[in-house]
Amino acid sequence: MQRYILSRVVQSVFMLFGVLLIIFLMLRLSGDPASLMVSRNATPEQIEAIREKMGFNRPFIVQFADFVGGALTGDFGMSTRHRQPALQLILERLPGTIELATASLLLAMLIGIPLGLLGGSNPGGFWDILCRGTGLIGQTIPNFWLALILILVFAVNLRWFPSFGRETWQFFGLTLPTKSVILPAFSLGLFTMGQLVRFTRSAVMEIKSEDFVRTAYSKGLLDKHIYIRHILRNASIPLISVLGVQFGYLLSGSIYIETIFSWPGLGNLLAEAIGNRDFALVQAIAFFASLVVITLSLLSDIAYGLADPRIRYGD
């Protein structure tokens, strides 16, 4: 088990270094960073001043070393638009993104896992048809298109939910979301819901054919005991890694949804940074989102190893 965890940690470190290299290169492949950060009417002297100030005139390897050192210490420079440290802006918007991603994941789990369990338990039946349909819809409908439809129906016509913004309320010192999170959470979590439905259905159908399940039936155990103690318990083991990856996707892939719903999170901040050509802030958000995905993937792999005896004992 220790060797398994160590190998995953080493892989995560290499992935993080690769992400740093990709972020550093991608933002420079579009052209001279200094010329992109100024207006079109800027003089060559102004461009050269920006290049000197941001260090773009230094050797390439020196720039990359400074970027890696700054990323590892949390120093991504100052936002040219907000005149604040990039990390400070990220930490200010982070709670909104965590709230939206958590609500999306919970919504996807509450609908996707039970529906997948019902579909896998009754292949070819009504619940199985509904399960496969939900999985297909969840993985084919673009979330930004769904968001616009939900706003038109439930916010504009029915007026059940607000169409934009983030509202909260205080409960014993805790900041809790209101119904303003429902539409963006459903739009963002639909793809994850489709993944969970299909994955749970496949896992249940596969586990039902195992020998230990047939043995449990032959002993005369009740269906609910078999599903809880054997089928659902074993199906939940691979779901751990899926949930970790999907939560990372929800945290880092909400740029369209946050922009459509004017949700004050990292996705909305990234869209603003790209539009304003805020070089330091774009780099900081891209690195932070990648770090979250890699960390969650590592934690889910470790949790999967702890839950699965075959990995724990090196089988």
Image: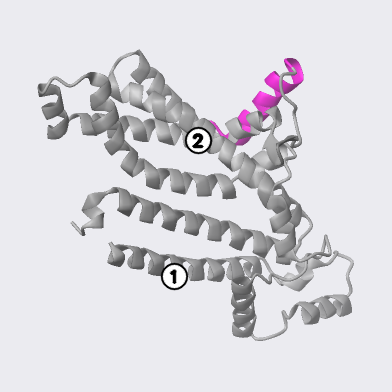
Q: Residues within 10 Å of mark 1 (few under 14, many from 20)?
A: few
Q: Residue at x 28, y 61 (%)?
A: 1
Q: Amino acid at mark 1?
A: Phe
Dot label at residue 265: none
Residue 249, given in percent of the width and then of the height, sits at: 52, 47
Residue 7, given in percent of the width and then of the height, sits at: 33, 67
Query: With 190 as the anchor, is 238 left or right in this view?
Result: left
- Give the vertical position of 279 relative to 110 (above or below): below
**On the image, which quarter does residue 123 sit in?**
top left
- Give the vertical position of 134 relative to 314 (above or below): above
Magenta highlight on residue 60: no
**On the image, which quarter does residue 53 sit in?**
bottom right
Q: Residue at x 63, y 35 (%)?
A: 144
Residue 81, given in percent of the width and then of the height, sits at: 82, 61
Segment tinted magenta in the rendering: 140-158
Q: Secondary structure at mark 1?
A: helix
Magenta residues: mostly which secondary structure? Answer: helix
Q: Secondary structure at mark 2?
A: helix
Query: With 278 as the anchor, is 116 left or right in this view?
Result: left
Dot label at residue 191: 2
Residue 266 visible in rendering: no
